[in-house]
Image (tube, helix red, strand yellow):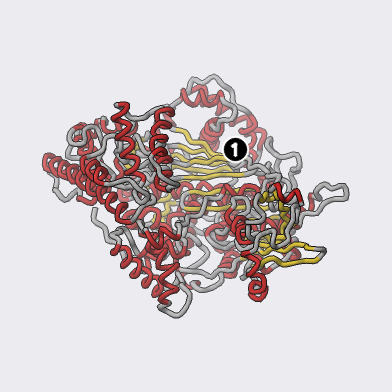
Amino acid sequence: MSSSVPSPESDKSRKYDRQIRLWGDHGQNLLENSQICLINANALGTEILKGLALPGIGSFTIIDQNLVTEEDIGSNFFLEQSSLGKSRAKCATQFLQELNPDVNGESIDENVDNIIANNSDFFQNFSVVVACALNEKSLIKLSNLLWDLNIPLISCKTVGFIGTARIQLKEYCVIETHPDNKHHDLRLEEPFDSLKEHCEKIELGSKVPWLVILFKHLEAYKVKYNKIPQTYKEKSELRTMIRDSMSADEENFEEAIKAVNSSFGGGKPNSVLQEILNDNACINLTKNSPPFWIMVRALKDFIENEGKGYLPLPGIIPDMTAETSLYINLQNVYRAKALQDADIVFRRVQELLEELNKSCDWITEKDVRLFCREAAYIAIIRGSKISDEYEKGSNTATIASELENIDSLMGHYVVLRSQDRFITEHGCMPGEIQVDIDTARVKSQASKLLNDWGINISLNDDLIHEICRYGGSEIHSVSAFLGGAIAHEIIKIVTRQYKSLDNTIIYDGINSQCATFKF
Amino acid sequence: MVETDLSKKWNYLRKILERSGPFDTEAFTPSSDTLDFLHNTCKILVIGAGGLGCELLKDLAMMGFKNIDVIDMDTIELSNLNRQFLFRRKDIGKSKAETAAEFINKRIPGTKVTPHFCKIQDYDESFYRQFHIVVSGLDSIVARRWINGMLISLVRLEEDGTVDQSSVIPMIDGGTEGFKGNARVIFPTLNACIDCNLDLFPPQISYPLCTIANTPRLPEHCIEYVKIIQWDKENPFKCALDGDDPEHVSWVYEKAQERANIYNITGLSYRLVQGVLKNIIPAVSSTNAVIAAVCATEVFKIATSCYEALNNYFVFNDIDGIYTYKFEAEKNPKCLACSTVPRMISINNPSSMTLQDLIDYLCTNVEFQMKSPGITTMINGKNKTLYMSTVKSIEEQTRSNLTLSLHELNLSDGQELIIADATNPNSIVVKLKFTDNEVEMY
């Protein structure tokens, strides 16, 4: 996992500065090596690629055998009047490529079904495949093909003010999830030896970091009550103890009092992590196990042995009012312990690599340090096949219970699926010409669909009527919303940072709201 | 370029505008007149041609709006190119507004985007009054508050005191930071405005001066020290510090690193130095695309009445999956900008509180958050300027007032102060309320 980091003064680094501050040089490197395939360059498709070409993906390939229509020009920013009647793939590729000379664009004027049927290796090298407004039959074939190749697929479409996206991922493992409110893991309840020694040497005063003040009072509390304060009343008692020992208005003591509420409870795996540690992929490593699972296994072994139930220490403390050297020394105590823990995990990783007959530099010390720092927040997302959702119906119990709720956007999901069936049956969009007749037809598709799923609830007709009013229209701002959101999901997948959508979003532009569901 | 006759180009919008549906508002009538209104009559002002502005111009032009003005005082930089997609490398140094307008007018013939390469403060009421809707994509809270104040001042009242609806110019405001963003719909004086809920903006990070000078602990503290203290002392380039000048940034980096070494502080990087010096907010194309799209959708709803507009605040975050939320921000009856009731400030120690203390209060209090308030009042029937920092000669004349107490300035209970600040194009009136008992005895 070596990567070249350009100097921050380099041209590329300056151009991408505002985003490298979010996903780092390592994230940018992964992005620049990604290859994205888009099927159908409608407005939604080009908006997605815009959101990927700008931050600098490696390359994109557009598959589209359509010729540019007037309606395309009225809804798609990456076509212009002179594009009329020409290959949509070619025209869109040209305009998208102008966004960023670092990105390679290719176009293929072919029917995607031919590629799926005759050249299935074609998809092998893509990082992600996105299919916009693809018909049911082709989507099902593509879903099966990409599931077997283990390549993420996103299926999406908008019609009028409604849009949806569905991600198909076999397994997505994330080390850097960037949670919004990271809890500092300080180990005050069961302090490690070097922290104890450090704190015991320090005398309290106005220049001491609150962490040391809290440590000393917590120790005193433990002696007095023989436990850790847990209830509100017990914590109040600890706060009173701190306040009583304060000689004047001292900021650091005030900070210690405030910190009573938020400083305990870190360091033990939560239920999400526990589930990952107990996962079969962790317990039974094979020679095909990816680095993530090898590190998870080393983590599990650490927690159960050297860690005595605790995670490796992240070694990060918040800023606090204190004299510089007292703060820095304390910071160094945490950092030294974190390095020590990470070193044990790294050695365990090396043993595992040897057992699995893998090269020992497959996972570096740097990888393990990052992993240990983030260990409390790692995540895995396991998805399901779109083809199963379409052919077998998945999660019908959730669909049924959501439909009982009048505010749920599950009704939109059912209507969009009914529209898909209509298109398959009639070969056109509902409402293109006749709204009333098609409304009745989509209604009967919806009834059939619900019947197939064993759901005995009838849908609100209004939404079906509205979908038919749209008559297959693609509204630019609706596709721009969904396109931006999907571009970011793809960035998450290729940078392996942040938790991706799992696995379906419905956007209702009429009421400016979204809902997510898992199928 | 002239729009050649593509009769089916707007067919998708026509399906919305010329057909009826079950979710239409009562005000909506299917007709070809609506598209004609978007094309030929409706005038939109886009404020900012940056990350959100570029997206807004594209979205609005693609939604059938043909008369759009865009205002932005900035020029194009290399670090804009990762998201401000109407700009190319060859455009670096050019006006954002002009370059963006030219791009849109060329790509979508028939659209007339008119650029204004200047500050929003350079124009007065007569300019802002000509628009049907204002959309803002700004990175400055002060500028947001200023345009908010401007649109409020355009609202006229009928003789019976009710609002003349035709004078209300809706404002759609978008904002982004990293993977988070928000969009809101403001009908000036009718619902919550920017100043009604200033607490919705994230607080600015600042470090206490004594920490920076005496007990630095973070690399940021070292950078701030060089920026605030060392630069002025050593004045290495005989000019003000410029965060865009690589030589300046390198000097600060070097000095901050020296200071960090003395204190054993780790983690300083060139990127961090740039970030602190320029107060850089991380930005990515996808969030701007999402928020601008929400804003443009709302502009379309308001201009066509096809659906009810967002009421009134939309939040977006895609760090963990995709999360959205909407709520109704409440109008603040004591709002500085949109309420007509003079704002009270309670003073319990007018004989010890100085004018400087009052100014500090106006700058730090969460409901005022002013920048450099200038204060005038009436004493014995005469206008008197107590302090004003924006005009040098007046600043020199009034500086001595800063250390005087409110009593010494002859201000009394119930005194009305007229305060001018960069956060509003109009002055606001604040009433002092002395709660001190001895005052009531006078």
Q: Which of the 4 quarters of the picture holds residue A446? A: top right
Q: Is residue B53 left or right of residue A396?
A: right
Residue A246: % across, % down:
40, 42
Crowding around mark 1 (Cα neighbors within 10 Å: few <14, some 14 to 19, many 20+) is: many
Q: Residue at x 74, y 43 (%)?
A: B28
Q: Quadrant of the N terminus of chain B?
A: bottom right
Give the number of callouts.
1
What's under tag 1, amino acid-wise?
Answer: Pro
Q: Mark 1 falls within which chain?
A: A
The one nearer the camera, A117 or A3, is A3
Q: Which of the 4 quarters of the picture holds residue B332? A: top right
Residue B163: % across, % down:
80, 48
Residue B202: % across, % down:
52, 50
Position of residue B307 relative to residue B39, above or below, is: above
Q: Is residue A463 left or right of residue A360?
A: right
Position of residue B200 relative to residue A440, above or below, is: below
Q: Residue at x 25, y 48 (%)?
A: A333
**Element at label 1:** loop
For disc 1, the marked residue is A430
- Whether residue A22 is visible to the viewer of this picture, yes or no, is yes
The one nearer the camera, A345 or A364, is A345
Q: Residue at x 70, y 47 (%)?
A: B437
The one nearer the camera, B316 or A504, is B316
Q: Is residue A423 left or right of residue B135?
A: left
Residue A328: % across, % down:
29, 54
